[in-house]
Image (cartoon, rainbow, N blue to C red):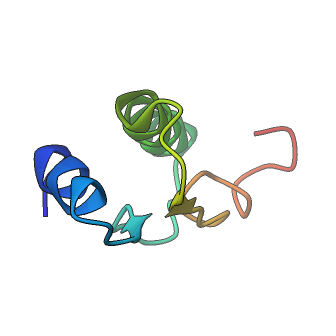
Amino acid sequence: MCSSDLFKNKNRGILSSVDVLGEDVKREEDAHAACDLYLRTIEALGNRKHTSISLKPGHMGAYVSREL
């Protein structure tokens, strides 16, 4: 489902949750890329009510470095 589908569903009164698919990353560069993807997704969702996004710490580099 793309973001335009989420917005159509919201206009119909359907609540949505976004899952960014990904696995645990092993490299810092991959963690930064995943984090950028999450940030772009959150930006696309804007301030829409009743929409959530699932965050995966391993996808964002939690197992690569605590500083990430």
Residue sticking out furthest to the front? 12
Compared with 7, 19 (above or below) is below
User: Is 41 above or below relative to 12?
Assistant: above
**Rendering coords of residue 25 (x, y %):** 50, 60
Q: Please, is residue 38 above or below residue 14 in the view? A: above
**29 sits to left or right of 44:** right
Residue 37 sits in which quadrant? top left
Which residue is nearer to you in this view: 35 or 40? 40
Q: Residue at x 12, y 56 (%)?
A: 5
Q: Position of residue 4 (x, y in %)?
A: 13, 44
Q: In the image, 59: left or right of 67?
A: left
Q: Quadrant of the C terminus?
A: top right
Q: In which quarter of the view is residue 52 placed?
A: bottom right
- Of all residues, the one furthest to the right in this rendering is 66
| Closer to the camera in the image, 24 or 40 | 40
Q: Is residue 65 left or right of residue 4?
A: right
Q: Position of residue 36 (x, y in %)?
A: 45, 31
12 or 43: nearer the eye? 12
The residue lying at 24 percent from left, 53 percent from top is 11
